[in-house]
Image (cartoon, grey):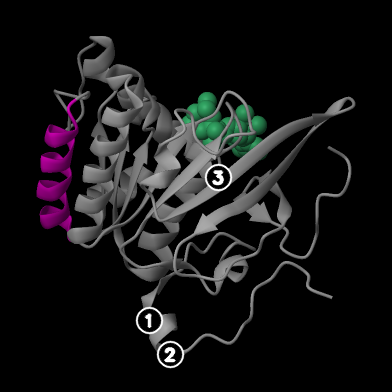
Amino acid sequence: MYDGAVSEEISMEDAVNRVRTGIPGFDELCGGGLIRDRTYLISGTSGAGKTNFSIQFIYNGITKYGENGIIVATEERPEQIRENVMKFGWDLEALEEENKLVIIDACSTKIGIPSQEKYVDVRPFDIRSMMDQIIATQEEINARRALIDSTTSVSFYLQDPAKIRIELLKLSTTLEVIGLTSMMTCELVEEDNPSRFGVENFVTDGTIVLYYKRHENVRMRSMEIYKMRGSDHSKKIHPYDITPEGFVIHPHEEVYSMF
Ligand SMILES: Nc1ncnc2c1ncn2[C@@H]1O[C@H](COP(=O)(O)OP(=O)(O)OP(=O)(O)O)[C@@H](O)[C@H]1O
Ligand SMILES: [Mg+2]
């Protein structure tokens, strides 16, 4: 019986083009990993785990696969991010000191407070300026992975879904062209739609939805690869845990009729 995992038989060419997230249980759900130089939307309601999931992708990239990374932090100050993920043993500051990671503070200016960070996005609602900063940073540290956490504040600023779509398309295409495999997070208020404004998932090559649903007196975590252009992938909803070591997805378990 099909258990959610995708065929293990990957061609050599395909294996080279796959970018392993290294997140336990994830890569086998999509033929060995993400397709290189593509952009993926990580959607979920508040607290679903979007930030942790995508930082694990960046952290593993640097520490396991030698691929440097860029994080654009729009919702949390870099200081908070460093502190939060230290709980999983991920020492981002050490990677920054080694020039393997850059965190761009796109949060402080937005809310009007001074930033002590080395990398600050002074025009956080301007996608063009964000792109320029990513391009410069990518050249500086030879980054191969990027994370924009999140797209939602820029989308709120733009408001018009047509504008959101074109601006995010420009951003995702630029990231791809300069050779970054990227994740963009997207906040959901309801889980029936894979994106907040109904357009974000159309401009990315893949969409991963993280669910955090209440069942009786407990909340259950599960995830789904909603789409992945150019790749076979599991069509099932798989449970996951956030453990002291980070995300662990259970690819051979399913979420049954509990919801
Ligand atoms: N050390 C830890 N061990 C286990 N679970 C943790 C730990 N740290 C955080 N969590 C869980 O992760 C959740 C937050 O995850 P994360 O910040 O990635 O969510 P998010 O989807 O980005 O949320 P938001 O929409 O607020 O940005 C917490 O609410 C908590 O349940
Ligand atoms: Mg978050």
Please state if 54 lies on the left or on the right of 69 as rendered: right
Disc marking residue 12: 2
Disc marking residue 227: none
Q: Residue furthest bottom?
A: 12
Question: For residue 30, what is the image quadrant?
Answer: bottom right
Spot occupied by residue 55 in the image (x, y as percentages of width and height): 44, 46
Q: Main secondary structure of the magenta part?
A: helix
Disc marking residue 16: 1
Question: How many labels sit on residues?
Answer: 3
Question: For residue 26, what is the image quadrant?
Answer: bottom right
Counting residues from the N terminus, which is met first, the one under dot 3 or under dot 1? 1
Between the residue at mark 2 and the residue at mark 1, the CA separation in whole angstroms equals 6 Å
Depth check, mark 3 against mark 1: the one in front is 1
Instruction: Tell me the kind of residue under disc 2.
Output: Met
Q: Which residues are magenta?
A: 126-142
Disc marking residue 88: 3
Q: Residues within 10 Å of mark 3 (few under 14, many from 20)?
A: some
Quadrant (top left/top right/bottom left/bottom right) for the N terminus? bottom right
Residue at 30% x, 63% y: name it.
Answer: 37
**Labels 2 & 1 near each other (Cβ < 8 A):** yes
